[in-house]
Amino acid sequence: MQREPRAWLTSIGVYLRAPVLTLLFLGFSAGLPYLLVFSTLTAWLEDSGVEVAAIGFFSWVGMLYSVKLFWAPIVDRVGLPVIGPWLGQRRSWMLLGQALIAGGLVGLSGVDPVGHLPLVALFALITAFGAATQDIVIDAYRIESGEPAIQAAMASTYIIGYRVGIVMAGAGALYIADAASWSAAYLSMAVLVSVGVITVLLRPEPPRPQGLRTVLFHPRIRQFLHRSRHRAHWQRHTGVWLLAAVFCPIGDFFHRYGRLALALLLFIGIYRISDIAMAAMANPLYLSLGFSKSDIASVTKVFGVLMTIGGGLLGGLLVVRYGLGRMLVTGALMVALTNLLFVMLSLGGDSLPLLVIAITGDNLANGLASTVFIAFLSSLTSRAYTATQYALFSSLMTLPGKFIGGFSGIVVSDFGYASFFVLSCLLGLPAVALAVWLNRRMPDLGNEMTTAEETPTETASAR
């Protein structure tokens, strides 16, 4: 029997529930540190007179977000001493991540980049590690603290909070730096970490799921338990944990897509490579052209975020209208070609209209491509391993671009900004070619997804 639609007031009321409001503040806490170790940090380094070749290497700090899977199992399974029994597994790790963020930002606020780059790098790494750890915990907290009926509302408030944190770390920090100093800006951001800390202390620990029972009936795990029945308990427990966390999700993906799996992984790694690789040089370009920090904040952070949201909404509508395959091609092409707007900006000089045009095109393209690509990654993810496989895909999506971005400063130093942005455009062309090829294979991909969902042995036994 079909459920009757809820009344409007009842539907809106879900956003007043405590778990949903909690994610608004946790989203802010998650979004705040990201730009402070990325584009805002590179703007500070450029403004301080640090050589552009050295600035490019600081984009590698953001790679910690891409490799957080390596310590995610520890955050998920290992309890912290002292504060762990008091706060619980999730809240204690979240508080530790926030402490690292605040400590790193306070450290950055007291360092002069000129002559102290290793110390700046150390505090930036501490901040990024704490932020990536916090992201791991917030994702788990969001899923565990609310029933399925309010998960969409929790995700919505999380995204809103995250965007507000991004604006604060971008535009807010630049405004403060323009009015006072970079030290005051980073110290102010450290104070804002208290929003997340207060939220953690006020909200309860969510109930933990029955982690081991959900995988005991998987065929591969049952086989391992049978073969290792004479081993010590800790050896069997460790083996089951490793199989469930690593082997089963990866094996499932390759089983479903076969030879096509490698092409899909390559496509995931290079789809956003052009815009991620160029991002480290965006703020240095603006400052080198003579734009004030306030102008940069207003156009790139406030107006730019609105354009990104608009691009995301447009991407969702176009996927419905034209299908996922065509929009993958469109998104890849737009992300690559909009890099040429920065070539125009670098040659045009201190022109606010040119800056607005570049930001409009770039952020619309990024918002559209991000929405389309998230839909694509979701379509590749097995329902039996949603969290693990999606985390692997999202990490792979950002890692190559951030690695290449570390060399961006050398390219700019040797060849100039215009040549760099032309090269970043060319980096995106292989993704366009692969998107065209995959678009032709979309019917085959759809069949493979359907086949995977209709295979009950692995899917049902892993739940």
Image (spheres, helix red, strand yellow):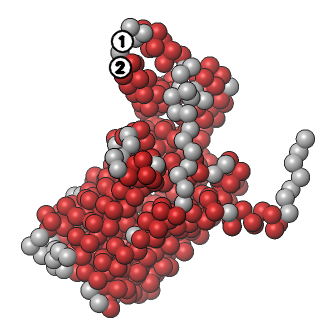
Q: Left or right? Give the position of 18 relative to 249.
A: right
| Residue in the image at 44% along x and 35% along y | 263
In front here: 415 or 461? 461
> Most extreme residue toward the left, as rendered?
115
> Most extreme residue toward the bottom, as rendered?
179
Location of residue 299 in the rendering, given as x and y in whole percent from the top left corner: 44, 82
Compared with 442, 422 (above or below) is: below
Q: Left or right? Give the position of 19 relative to 33.
A: right
| Residue in the image at 61% along x and 65% along y | 21
Three-letter code for the amino acid on which mark 1 is drawn: Arg
Residue 323 numbered mark, or none: none
Compared with 77, 161 (above or below) is: below
Q: Which residue is mark 2?
A: 235
Location of residue 410 in the rendering, given as x and y in whole percent from the top left corner: 18, 63
Three-letter code for the amino acid on which mark 2 is drawn: Gln
Q: Left or right? Give the position of 385 relative to 287.
A: right
| Residue in the image at 86% along x and 56% along y | 5
Q: Which residue is mark 1?
A: 231
In front here: 234 or 105? 234
Instruction: Report how far apart the C-alphas of labels 2 and 1 lie in the structure.
Output: 6 Å
Q: Left or right? Give the position of 290 relative to 9.
A: left
